[in-house]
Image (cartoon, helix red, strand yellow):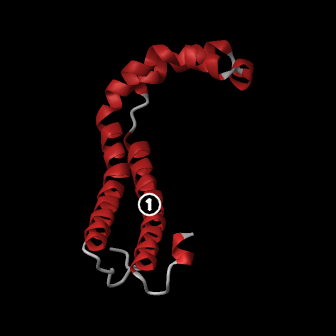
Amino acid sequence: AIRKKSEEHSLAENHCTYIIRTIWIGGALSVVTIAVASGLLVADLDYSPFIPCSESFAEKGQEFVNNATYEQIMHLSQPCMNDFIAANMNGLVLAGLVGIVPILIYFAYRYVKGLMRALNGYRLADPKAWF
């Protein structure tokens, strides 16, 4: 709304364009980083701590597995959860960092750059630039 009300090539229009681009590019970057983080996580997961729990699922039979509620599944898998998390902690942390840190750096850079220019009354040379 502010962007549409502002004059063309004004400071407000310039910075609104910059903010909108930041959000869209940040969203695209988040899709990429989350995909990479998911790939790292899936490739690195150790499922062996779930073997005892999977045996309890097998004992219950296929019909139970097909018709089980979320609570029933969580109840049977809960004894293995702490071992699973402990065995995969490094991979979980790495995937979390890969998924979120680049996005945070990008947003911090864009917001600081835009804020510093706006506080000094300057327009951005190219509000549609990626960086």
Amino acid bearing label 1? Val
Q: Secondary structure at mark 1?
A: helix
Q: Is residue 42 above or below residue 118?
A: above
Give the total of numbered labels. 1
Q: Quadrant of residue 45?
A: top left
Instruction: Give the residue number, with chain letter if any, for mark 1.
Output: 32
In the displayed structure image, the side of residue 101 where residue 48 appears, left or right: right
Task: Please indicate, yes or no, whether residue 55 appears anywhere in the rendered image.
Answer: no
Q: Residue at x 48, y 66 (%)?
A: 24
Residue 68's spot in the image, x, y percent?
70, 20
Residue 11's spot in the image, x, y percent?
39, 79
In the displayed structure image, the side of residue 50 where residue 87 appears, left or right: left
Q: Residue at x 44, y 87 (%)?
A: 9
| 49 vs 13, nearest the viewer | 13
Please rate how many residues cluster around mark 1, counting C-alpha atoms within 10 Å: few if below 14, some from 14 to 19, many from 20. Answer: some
Q: Quadrant of residue 30?
A: bottom left
Image quadrant in which the N terminus is located: bottom right
Task: Please indicate, yes or no, whether residue 87 appears anywhere in the rendered image.
Answer: yes
